[in-house]
Image: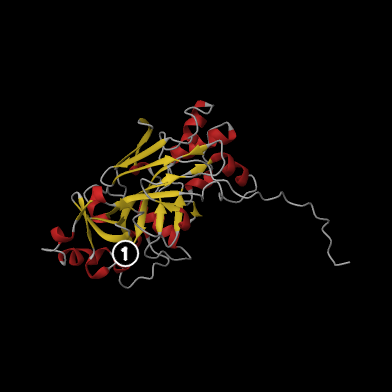
């Protein structure tokens, strides 16, 4: 099944994507309600629409898709070894993967208030190195009897409601400055994250899951019609169940949380290609560029880069005298 959020005639709708149309959930339920109830309740909910679905359906062509979830939080992992190899070359001049990468799956928190949908114009900060990142996001749902805390990997898989496409837009020059302070990334990332076009439920992938829990679905990214990257989601260092388990350690995952896979290898972002080429080839994204991402069994998202935002200036740090007492 696929679930989505959209606008039509000035109103927000939330429901199922059925064929080439969208059908609102019964009883005025929202995506947040459905995620909280969990994947196990979805067949019953769908059955409530039998006989009424055709009458309440709207053609997909007539609606504007929103991001399919308003996230409670967004964690983004770095789970593809090949991506790390390429990006470190672009930063340090030599490809390497730190030993610590292999120990646990590392992530950062990004901004749940800067989520954009497929079709939106993305307005970046003033940057000379705007980049995309091809990812898949796992969306967390509720599980009866679990508070989502300290999950084992086998338990954690059951908390994955479904998957969506995830583009972690990046201003690499800003990100690089921030990382030199040994904190972040922050403003190099938090201006936009695309989620969409909808959530495809986890059961739709059951026939593809291998013995270790990996999903070999094809991922591709195109810029202005040219394919720059493609990979399989199964090339992650950890399957999603283990990412969810790690996120829940000494913490919780809750319905509406989104966990990004991290950037795919083999051209999943420009920075990886820059590292391998030793130069800014292909060039950084610019105003007017169209970025399209396609993931097997989910669909595609597309965004156009808009003009950089004009923002108020902030002065540099003052070098203070470090007095320890008031005069």
**Which quarter of the image is occupied by the N terminus?**
bottom left
On the image, the x and y values in percent for residue 24 come to 23, 62
Query: Which sits in the foreground, 125 or 83?
Result: 125
Label 1 element class:
helix
Q: Residue at x 54, y 27 (%)?
A: 278
Image quadrant in which you'd find residue 322: bottom right
Q: Residue at x 63, y 50 (%)?
A: 312
Query: Which sits in the foreground, 192 or 250?
Result: 192
Q: Residue at x 39, y 47 (%)?
A: 120
**Left or right, 17 with reference to 88:** left
Q: How is the image coloured?
A: secondary structure
Which residue was labeled with disc 1? Answer: 35
**Left or right, 80 with reference to 1:** right
Disc 1 residue crowd, few under 14, some 14–19, many 20+, Cα 10 Å? many
**Left or right, 319 with reference to 200:** right
Image quadrant in which you'd find residue 320: bottom right
Going by the picture, which residue comes out furthest to the right?
A: 327
Going by the picture, which residue comes out furthest to the front?
A: 9
On the image, the x and y values in percent for residue 129 come to 54, 36
Number of marks in picture = 1
**Left or right, 234 with reference to 317:** left
Would you place residue 285 above or below residue 61 in this image? Answer: above
**Which quarter of the image is occupied by the C terminus?**
bottom right
Query: Which sits in the foreground, 315 or 273?
Result: 315
On the image, the x and y values in percent for residue 16 come to 23, 58
């Amino acid at each position: 099944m696929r679930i989505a959020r959209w606008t039509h005639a000035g109103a927000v709708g939330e429901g199922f994507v059925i064929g080439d149309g969208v059908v609102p959930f019964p009883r005025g339920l929202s995506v947040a309600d459905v995620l909280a109830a969990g994947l196990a309740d979805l067949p019953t909910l769908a059955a409530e629409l039998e006989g009424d679905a055709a009458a309440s359906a709207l053609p997909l062509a007539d609606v504007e898709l929103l991001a399919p979830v308003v996230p409670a939080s967004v964690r983004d992992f770095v789970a593809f070894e090949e991506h790390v190899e390429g990006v470190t070359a672009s930063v340090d001049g030599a490809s390497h993967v730190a030993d610590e990468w292999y120990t646990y799956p590392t992530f950062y928190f990004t901004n749940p208030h800067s989520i954009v949908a497929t079709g939106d114009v993305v307005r970046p900060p003033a940057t000379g190195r705007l980049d995309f990142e091809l990812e898949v996001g796992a969306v967390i749902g509720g599980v009866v009897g679990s508070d989502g805390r300290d999950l084992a990997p086998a338990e954690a898989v059951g908390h994955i409601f479904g998957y969506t496409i995830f583009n972690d837009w990046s201003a690499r020059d800003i990100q690089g400055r921030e990382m030199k302070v040994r904190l972040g990334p922050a403003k190099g990332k938090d201006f936009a994250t695309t989620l969409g076009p909808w959530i495809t439920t986890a059961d739709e992938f059951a026939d593809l899951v291998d013995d270790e829990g990996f999903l070999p679905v094809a991922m591709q990214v195109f810029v202005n019609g040219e394919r720059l990257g493609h990979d399989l989601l199964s090339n992650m260092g950890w399957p999603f169940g283990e990412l969810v388990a790690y996120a829940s350690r000494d913490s919780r995952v809750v319905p509406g949380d989104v966990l990004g896979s991290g950037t795919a290898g083999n051209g999943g972002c420009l920075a990886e290609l820059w590292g391998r080429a030793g130069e800014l080839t292909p060039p950084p994204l610019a105003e007017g560029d169209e970025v399209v991402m396609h993931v097997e069994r989910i669909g595609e998202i597309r965004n156009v880069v808009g003009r950089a935002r004009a923002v108020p200036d902030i002065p540099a740090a003052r070098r203070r005298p470090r007095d320890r007492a008031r005069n």
